[in-house]
Image: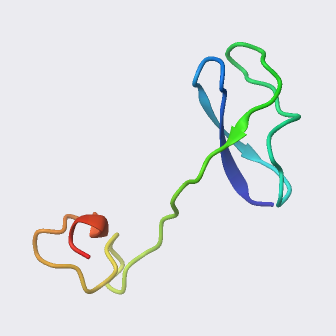
C-alpha cells in the first residue's frame, strides 16, 4: 500500500497515512483537532541519482540536489 499525505482543512495539520490506492481522505480523522474528512495532498517522491546521490545525474554544478532550480 502507498503512503499518502493528507491535510486537515480545519487546523492545517499534515499527516502521512499508509492506505489503499484511491483513498480520498473523507473517512480519515485528524490527530490534532479530531475533524473527520482530510484533504489529499499532492506530494513529491525521492529517487536516487545515477551516482547514488539525490540528483538526477545530469544536474548542473550549483544544483545542490534540488533539480527544480536547474531544469
Relative horizontal placement of residue 58, taking residue 36 as reference (left or right): left
Q: Identify the residue at horizontal 81%, vertical 47% (top origin).
A: 24
Q: Position of residue 44 (x, y in %)?
A: 51, 59
Q: Position of residue 66 (x, y in %)?
A: 28, 63
Name the residue furthest top.
Answer: 33
Name the residue furthest left.
Answer: 61
Looking at the picture, does residue 59 appear above or below residue 29?
below
Q: Quadrant of residue 58?
A: bottom left
Looking at the picture, does residue 16 appear above or below residue 45?
above
Q: Identify the residue at horizontal 48%, vertical 65% (top origin).
A: 46
Q: Quadrant of residue 30?
A: top right
Q: Observer-nearest residue: 37 or 2? A: 37
Looking at the picture, does residue 16 appear above or below residue 37?
below
| Colour pattern | rainbow
Number of marks: 0
Q: Position of residue 48 (x, y in %)?
A: 43, 75
Q: Identify the residue at horizontal 81%, vertical 26% (top origin).
A: 29
Relative horizontal placement of residue 15, taking residue 46 as reference (left or right): right
Relative horizontal placement of residue 65, taking residue 2 as reference (left or right): left
Relative horizontal placement of residue 68, taking residue 22 as reference (left or right): left
Q: Identify the residue at horizontal 70%, vertical 53% (top origin).
A: 3
Name the quarter where the C terminus is drawn.
Answer: bottom left
Q: Observer-nearest residue: 50 or 29? A: 29
Name the quarter where the N terminus is drawn.
Answer: bottom right
Q: Position of residue 12 (x, y in %)?
A: 57, 24
Amino acid at each position: 500500500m502507498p503512503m499518502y499525505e493528507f491535510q486537515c482543512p480545519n487546523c492545517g495539520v499534515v499527516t502521512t497515512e499508509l492506505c489503499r490506492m484511491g483513498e480520498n481522505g473523507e473517512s480519515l480523522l485528524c490527530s490534532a483537532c479530531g475533524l473527520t474528512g482530510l484533504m489529499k495532498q499532492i506530494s513529491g517522491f525521492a529517487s536516487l541519482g545515477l551516482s547514488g546521490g539525490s540528483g538526477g545525474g545530469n544536474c548542473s554544478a550549483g544544483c545542490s540536489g534540488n533539480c527544480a532550480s536547474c531544469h
